[in-house]
Image (cartoon, grey):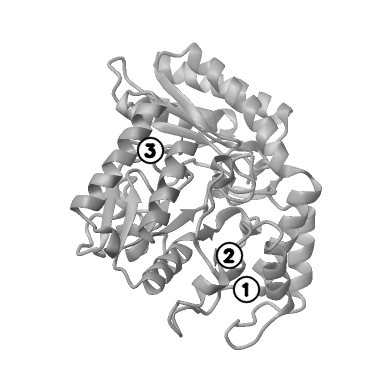
Amino acid sequence: MANLSPLLKQATPVVVARGEGVYLYDQDDRRYLDFTAGIGVTSTGHCHPRVVAAAQEQVATLIHGQYTTVMHRPLLTLTERLGEVLPERLDSVFFSNSGSEAVEAALRLARHATARPNIVVFHGSFHGRTIGAASMTTSGTKFRAGFSPIMGGVAVSPFPTAYRYGWDEQTATEFALRELDYLLATVTAPAETAAFLVEPVLGEGGYVPANTAFMEGLRERADRHGILLVVDEVQTGWGRTGRFWGHDHFGVQPDILITAKGLASGFPLSAIAAPADLMAKAWPGSQGGTYGGNAVACAAAIATLDVIRDEGLVDNARVVGAALSAGLEKVAANTAGIGDVRGLGLMLGNEFITADGQPDPTTAQRAQQKAAELGLLLLTCGPFGNVVRMIPALVVTKEQVEDALAIWAAAVDFATSA
């Protein structure tokens, strides 16, 4: 008899039988509020009827048409439709399956297009688990330890994580940009630097938003030195932050955009987008794959776009996210053990600390587990595992947020009084 790898540790004890909207139901038909959304994947909720219908229709017509062998209509239609939401200059798209694959494709394109070897990433970033993506990940050693040598050519610069440094945002931002300049003077020469790779909000690194001054600083330095600005929107894209793209909050245009997760409401699909003249600099044969641009996944992504537009889900993420944030702030105000609440839209984190201000993963874990026991599914993140994150589907309502906040308050009270 085969078993799952013992390394696959479950965040909750729930064995799911079905899903509907923001709810999951276990084998005994007990209902749970799902504020994990498959780690930000089920953007339109579990089994949205329009996504289900699109996938069912496509399964009966064409399941797989390998896209370097034949073209198929869902792939062509999705590519056209992405033009409605992508940044203006980014008019060429390459599809793959996972965020890691898309990150690797962006890395390869950046090196090909610039003929430069080095990539600058930012402390606390998560870009994936494959060798190149893991080599650019600094949100925790568990993602890159034990299989050295990892990929070379990666330099790490500070992210403006004001709470960790104990500074205000302006001071943290000035420090981060000053250290980036120092990195370019001492570690990776601008003439050897292909790209800056940045998340608009650190994901696994603890749900820390960037800010306008930092992103503008990256854009200015990229333009000055001929470096590409690559924005990893795997978790922040498709309305998650209350804007369609996370970088929209900061008024900065990327040269390459990476997207996945919420793109197809749970079907495996990812992509990179770049200007056509930049994409054309990739070497022949460097882009491809067996399953990328799968017909069923593309059909689901088209339906996802329709639902996000027709149901106003980007605005919903902004409005309901603000209500969730305000509720979390109220809980934190009465809890000495929560040092910070932060995030954008429906991408929010609660950082647990000890009495002397150190990371407190034990209490964070107790709160997360108690919430599951009470019917609210959550995940932890952050380098120390002391941040409890909330990423419900974009269809979540204020009433469902109120229910979640009541459970969260009880879970926090239990965890901090234990």
- The residue carrying mark 3 is 382
- Farthest residue toward the bottom? 69
- The residue carrying mark 1 is 294
Q: Are marks 1 and 2 in contact (CB under 8 Å)?
A: yes
Q: Residue at x 25, y 63 (%)?
A: 153
Question: Is residue 138 at all visible to an observer of this figure?
Answer: yes
Q: How many C-alpha atoms fall within 10 Å of the one at disc 3: few (<14), some, or many (≥20)? A: many
- Separation of residues labelled 1 and 2 (CA atoms): 8 Å
Coordinates of residue 217 in the picture (x, y in percent): 41, 43
Q: Are marks 2 and 3 in contact (CB under 8 Å)?
A: no
Q: How many C-alpha atoms fall within 10 Å of the one at disc 1: few (<14), some, or many (≥20)? A: many
- What amino acid is found at the position of numbered circle 3 in the picture? Gly
Among numbered discs 1 and 2, the one appearing first in the sequence: 2
- What amino acid is found at the position of numbered circle 2 in the picture? Leu
Q: Is residue 361 above or below residue 267?
A: above
Coordinates of residue 102 in the picture (x, y in percent): 48, 65
